[in-house]
Image: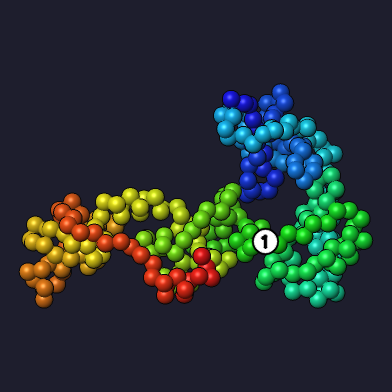
Amino acid sequence: MAEVVGVRFKEVGKVYYFDPDGHTLKKGDRVIVETARGVECGEIAMDNRDVNDEEIVKPLKKLLRIATEDDLKKVEENKEKEKKAFEICEKKILKHKIDMKLVDIEYTFDNSKILFYFTADGRVDFRELVKDLASVFHTRIELRQIGVRDESKMLGGIGICGRPFCCGSFLGDFQPVTVKMAKEQGLSLNPTKISGTCGRLMCCLKYEQDAYEHLLRITPKVGAIVETPEGRGRVVDVNLLRGNLKVQLDRRADAAPATFNRKEVKLIKDKKIQVEKEELDALKNIE
């Protein structure tokens, strides 16, 4: 076991463990730590606690100090520098005629490096741009190409549900989301219905997936053969949440399907939920 604190460097970023070095800290405290990219100012997201050694990426770096008024002032100064650097970089991109979109700029706390985040279709040659920026800012320059999900997380916005983006408000890491999840949850495989503002599958498809997987294990699927109180039949429709099945009875093939609860039927032969190749091809750009 080791005592750690969790430090976050962005409002909704990943939490990293550090050795508190004897300090007792609480959420919201600002601290100065050394990271792989230099000295940074972060915020305590998890107060002092003991965690198992397996959860720690060693070596565990120590806290340098609790942020002072001068440190916080420097953070604000860096934010102002980032605004000016953004304008300069956009002009340089136009000058070099590079097909890329600048998304965000980040100064490291000690100003030893400036990171420029951008999106682009495919790879771009930005070597001349880096040289040009280095001659202006006289420090290390790093350009990072990011995906559309990362862009949405950085810029924020309002989703189709009317709430702020999950990725920009509370999701620390992106979870894998697949078209199969949408199909298992009975959603229409219409790109406009299951994709977010970023154009990729909505992150919220992951939230209830465990519950749906459990229900799918205990509920016959469409196409399954079941034995009902009124005889054998084939499932033609399923309401997973209510547990209700519409069954086309073999002895009443021309009649309307009868409705039963999953507890009333016995499964004879189940079916699998599969995403057809045509469906995957139609949705390949949003997965």
Which of these two is toward me, 167 or 136? 136
- Residue at left offset 73%, top offset 38%: 30
Which of these two is toward me, 145 or 87? 145
Q: Amino acid at mark 1?
A: Ile
Q: Residue 39: which quarter of the image?
A: top right
**Residue 40 to residue 96: above or below:** above
Q: Is residue 269 left or right of residue 214?
A: left
Q: Which residue is mark 1?
A: 146
Q: Residue furthest top?
A: 22
Location of residue 249 in the rendering, given as x and y in whole percent from the top left corner: 12, 67
- Residue at left offset 84%, top offset 73%: 96
**Residue 70 to residue 250: above or below:** above
**SS assignment at label 1:** loop
- Residue at left offset 12%, top offset 58%: 228
Location of residue 13 in the rendering, given as x and y in whole percent from the top left corner: 64, 48
Q: Is residue 230 visible?
A: yes
- Residue at left offset 29%, top offset 52%: 217
Q: Is residue 260 visible?
A: no
Q: Is residue 241 left or right of residue 52?
A: left
The image shows a total of numbered marks equal to 1
Q: Residue 18: which quarter of the image?
A: top right
